[in-house]
Amino acid sequence: MERLSQIAEVVVDRDTMIEMYHRMLLARAFEETVFDVYRRGWMPGLAHLADGQEAVPVGVCMALRPDDTITSTHRGHGHIIGKGGQVEPMMAEVMGKATGYCRGKGGEMHIADVKLGILGANGIVGGGIGIAAGSAFTAKREGKGRVSVAFFGDGAINQGIWYETANMAVLWKLPLIYVCENNQYTEYTNYRKLQAGEGLVARAEAMGMPGLEVDGNDVLAVYSATLEMVERARRGEGPSMLVCHTFRYGGHHVGDPGTKYRTKEEIEEWKAKDPIVRFEKVLVERGVLSPGDIEEMHSKVEKRLAAAVEAGRNAPYPDVSEVTEHVYA
Amino acid sequence: MSTRELTFAQAIREALDEELARDPNLFILGEDVGAWGGVFRCTEGLYEKYGPDRVIDTPLSEEGFVGLAVGAAMTGMHPVPEIMFGDFITLAMDQIVNQAAKMRYMTGGQVKVPITFRATMGAGRSSGAQHSQSWHAWFAHVPGLKVVVPSTPYDAKGLLKTALREPNPVVFFEDKVMYAKIKGPVPEEEYTIPFGKADIKREGSDITLVALSRMVHPTLAAAEMLAKEGISAEVIDPRTLTPLDEETLIQSVCKTGGAVIVDEGYNRFGVTAELAAVIAYGAFDYLDAPVERLGAMDVPIPFSPPLEFTTIPDEQKIVERVHKVLEGRRR
Ligand SMILES: Cc1ncc(C[n+]2csc(CCOP(=O)(O)OP(=O)(O)O)c2C)c(N)n1
Ligand SMILES: [Mg+2]
């Protein structure tokens, strides 16, 4: 079912590449830190982590303008960081603190900074797809070339709302980009057992929109394909679908080791294609960063995350009087 | 003030028309709402006047177009999705309950979700079990939503205009039996009606009858019948369920000492149960008999007229319940 599309890699300037790399590092470090925070009992609830998938959210979001919007998922930390979210209020939100992006009302699964164009992270699988279509609807009306991205998983593509909005988006030429992150598993079941047909590009084409399928662990491929779709959407030519093949290293959530339904070989095979290690190689080969630069960036990111955890732990919980705030505007 | 008589549907249409003219961010979407003018004629002429970008014919995709409405609302528009038969709102439930109602809360107040969902309710047309249901109680159960249940053309227009200016998601229920059948005075001049203010449709001193949406009309007819027996009934229409004007209900029962609540939704865990609880708590010391609840019978709505009319309240049933309360009082 995986047939990668031929996509010409676009020329990416040095600063953009460094920023991509920086966001990928932040996204990876954030997930690793949350796992640690969870194990130490410093956060309530569970968390859905996306380490291993960083090239998708970063590659897509770096191809967007600040005023473009995204909708995120239950596995959404990378989307937030990709769109420019800050790890400090993210970590505080994970811990349920008043300094969190949503003042502790959203939590791990619902982190959002609306000012950055993040229209919520959704706990309902597929739940953000309608919202993304609505943002695309507004964007078309505004006529400023803004686009909307819906992130969702290989499981969510089987929800009816995808087909309902795809139909409308094609009919009305909405500037919408569907980004399917195929991390191979829908919870504990391989996607091949759950998806009929000839793959998702075929589904997109059946709905009347183009689709591209890329190696989702190659950030430049994701970026290049997204740019093509974004430009098409900005030109008023309507929606398209990007399918990114990738893999989550951890389990479905932090309480699942992810080893019962996946073989060691499968996990090792994907780890050998790690998106960050691969991008580091490219950066060094192209003379964008030296191994020393890379090491320095790693340690800066680690320090920043450690400080975010410290700040989050020291931050106050929201006052209980806030519980009735924000129910109505 | 000059007034004229409008049907319920004409009053709805007028509110939509005026607000479309006033607010460029407002747009209507739904099935056959455009060129066709709406299955219940509530959008007649609006497509011609405002064009296909403001009055939008959607595919049959309740979840999809309601979801699209949520996203449009979060990005600055004010969508007005029409759910043709309120029964079909089940297909959009996730988008209303899990998305629209709590996006503001989950983001810690970062977004507003101004949407006016228009849906129908009401039995009595032999439309069968999937085209006759009244689901307003469901939405009154959901924090983050406001719920409106008007009973007259005047209230419908004034409350809909308020809904269309609300920064929150509102579910606005229109009883389809009223669209063409109920006529009433509506001023030419602009007016709005605030949410959370019950209307005393008839003053009385012996018993309080609480009714909403179409049920106000058989309740007023029952009050008329009771008057002939020398019983003075007060009829109160809450008009909005969220927010609810508890004060007016409680004050009336403090005066009359008894209440019958009439609703076309199901009794079980429904509006009648909630309002009875409000009254029992707020007017406990003044009640001379238990509060009577007259909702729809707890069965799917049948097709055959003698069966169907058995399940929904009417004048006769209301009068019987009033007698029951008053007898309880004498005991
Ligand atoms: C409507 C709905 N059904 C089921 C779930 C439970 N659930 C949470 S995540 C998930 C799997 C989603 O798979 P996919 O879309 O591939 O995303 P991934 O977890 O792989 O990132 C399920 C079934 C849910 N949250 N929402
Ligand atoms: Mg998956």
Image: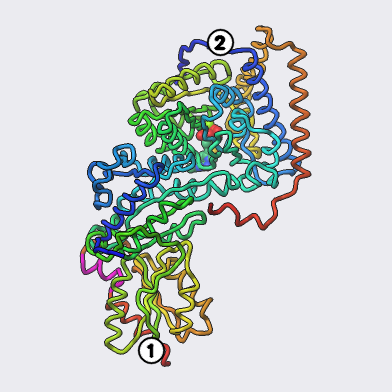
Is the C terminus of chain B in the top left, top right, bottom left or bottom right quadrant? Answer: bottom left
Q: Main secondary structure of the magenta part?
A: helix
Disc 1 residue type? Glu
Disc 2 residue type? Val
Q: Quadrant of residue A143?
A: top left
In screen coordinates, is A26 left or right of B235? right
Is the N terminus of chain B in the top left, top right, bottom left or bottom right quadrant? Answer: bottom left
- Other residues around mark 1 within 10 Å, as few (<14) / some (14–19) / many (≥20): few
Q: Chain of mark 2?
A: A
Q: Nearer the viewer, residue A260 or A29?
A: A29
| Residue B228 drawn at (x, y percent) | 27, 87
Helix, strand or loop at mark 1: helix
In screen coordinates, is A95 left or right of B13? right
Residue picked out by circle 2: A11
**B110 lies above or below B122:** above
Q: Residue furthest front?
A: B1
| Residue B239 drawn at (x, y percent) | 40, 65
Q: Nearer the viewer, residue B259 or B1?
A: B1
At horizontal 68% and vertical 24% (from top left) the residue drawn is A25
Segment colored magenta = B305-314
**A296 lies above or below A315:** above
| Residue B28 drawn at (x, y percent) | 34, 44
Residue B170 visible here: yes
At horizontal 77% and vertical 43% (from top left) the residue drawn is A313
Residue picked out by circle 1: B327
